[in-house]
Amino acid sequence: MNYTADMEKAMHQAHNMSYAEYSRKLDTRLKVEEKRQREFEESQKMIAQVDRQLHK
């Protein structure tokens, strides 16, 4: 995969690290992926809540 400057910028903004650091350290990568998973689950809960409110 070609890693672009925009992807690098997003990595810094979201996780305060470079892609090189992310790919080099397994424990760092695991922490980032755990955070992404939590954020995904939270967003799914919010979507479900909004969906329930829309269909009352």
Image (tube, grey):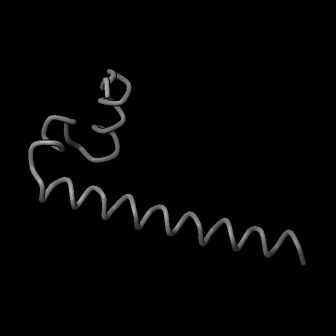
Residue farthest toward the bottom in the current orientation of the protein: 56
Left or right, 49 with reference to 19: right
- Name the residue located 79 percent from the left edge and 75 percent from the top edge: 52
Q: How many numbered circles does the render carry?
A: 0
Relative to 45, say whether 32 is above or below.
above
Left or right, 49 with reference to 32: right
- Name the residue located 50 percent from the left edge and 68 percent from the top edge: 41
Residue farthest toward the left in the current orientation of the protein: 25
Q: Looking at the figure, which quarter contains the C terminus? A: bottom right
Relative to 27, say whether 53 is above or below.
below
The spot of residue 42 in percent (x, y) is 51, 68
- Name the residue located 19 percent from the left edge and 36 percent from the top edge: 18
The spot of residue 37 in percent (x, y) is 40, 64
Quarter occupied by residue 12: top left
Left or right, 20 with reference to 52: left
Relative to 16, say whether 44 is above or below.
below
- Name the residue located 28 percent from the left edge and 47 percent from the top edge: 15
Quarter occupied by residue 7: top left
Residue farthest toward the front in the current orientation of the protein: 1
Quarter occupied by residue 11: top left
Relative to 55, say whether 13 is above or below.
above
Q: Looking at the figure, which quarter contains the N terminus? A: top left
The spot of residue 38 in percent (x, y) is 41, 67
Left or right, 36 with reference to 18: right
